Image: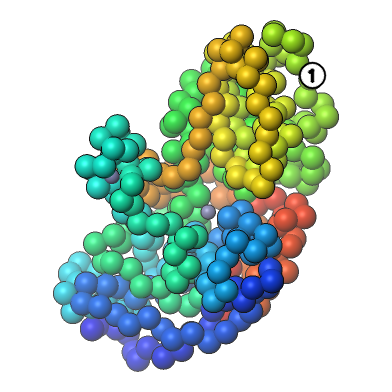
Amino acid sequence: MRSEGALPELMRAAVYVGDAQIEVQDLPVPTLGAGDALVEVSHCGICGTDLHLVLENYARAGSVLGHEWAGTIAAVGTDVRGWQPGDRVVVNPTGGCGECRACRRGRPSVCLRREPPDLLDFSRGAFCRYKLADAKRLLRVPDGLSTRAAALTEPTAIAIHTVNLADPRPDDRVLVTGAGPVGLLTTAVLRARGVDDITVSEPSPLRRERALAVGAHTALTPDELSRAPMGRPVEAPFTHAFECSGNARAAEAALDQLDYAGTLVFVGTGHDAPRVNHNRVIVLELTMIGAYNYDAAGFAPALELLASGTLPLDLLIEPDDVGLAEVQATLHRLAAGELPGKVMVVPT
Ligand SMILES: [Zn+2]
Ligand SMILES: [Zn+2]
């Protein structure tokens, strides 16, 4: 093993203890294997998934959540070449197996043999000080990009995948419903792709304001969206709608705003399912798609986009980071819509 100084035996971690509660506990620092790197977590973003897992009690007691992170290598195993303690990294997702029926259809993002996401494998969250990673999956954080901003890599990779699946052209008219962290990032990635005509629908004034700041052309309250006449498009319809709120009413409204041959992309998950007006889908020949994971290229394009300077990182990330002890309170603030951007946890 190579490391800079001795490693501690215990680390602080935010642990889900059941009953919608998180507690800061001391956990053992993971043991390094020959091909592993031990990465000291610099920042880990709070995801909407973490909110669902904790506040709606889906998580298993004893889990450490958090999957949007970047850090600095603290130690590497004896077989690891090309990586040193001090290197700044993110961990690439596993690629598809290339053989299962999803991979054979060109969709490794839903590979049947992919590693379960962290939210299903609770032992591996990053609301803690140290994470173990297979050195073969490490990606270097580019020089011009802070490790803090690199913690946006995972959600940026999802936003890129989302936009790629829908594949809007620069002259398309796009609606984004929900301007929380996912909606804001989707808006910013759409802008980076040259799509300028973006309308965001969002009830919170704070989030509407942030949506305009990250590049939306128009921001509306959900009430301001027009009611769809039967069998015909609204007066100013959209070619694409990205449903980022997970709210059933928002999804129904988004579908109503589409033009002939328009596309609705489901991005935000939610407890209640929307009612789909199938007549409208038929008559207007609409398409509905779901976006869940990453492109086959993994995290590299997201790192590149983040390092390119085209995304408004200071607006996508909330200015105040929080410690592990503040995660619980921050989950509630996020659920209440008080914080538009991504909140970063510093695991101290
Ligand atoms: Zn996430
Ligand atoms: Zn596969």
The residue beneath circle 1 is 227
Identity, as a three-letter code, of the amino acid under mark 1: Arg
Report the residue at 56% width, 39% height from top: 267
Q: Position of residue 308 (x, y in %)?
A: 43, 44
Asked if the residue at label 1 sits under 8 Å from ligand 1, the reply is: no
Q: Position of residue 251 (x, y in %)?
A: 67, 32
Determine the image quadrant of residue 243: top right
Q: Position of residue 185 (x, y in %)?
A: 57, 43
Q: Position of residue 181 (x, y in %)?
A: 62, 48
320 or 13: which is nearer to us? 13
Q: Quadrant of the N terminus?
A: bottom left
275 or 133: which is nearer to us? 275
Judge left or right: residue 213 versus residue 338.
left
Instruction: Check disc 1: other Cα within 10 Å, few if <14, some if 14-19, many if 20+.
Output: few
Quarter of image, ligand 2: top left
Determine the image quadrant of residue 249: top right
42 or 63: which is nearer to us? 63
Q: Quadrant of the C terminus?
A: bottom right
Q: Is residue 311 above or below residue 252?
A: below
Report the residue at 44% width, 45% height from top: 293
Q: Is residue 242 above or below residue 6?
A: above
Report the residue at 29% width, 60% height from top: 137
Judge left or right: residue 193 versus residue 329.
left
Does dot 1 land on a helix, a strand or a loop?
Answer: loop
Q: Is residue 166 above or below residue 24?
A: above
7 or 102: which is nearer to us? 102
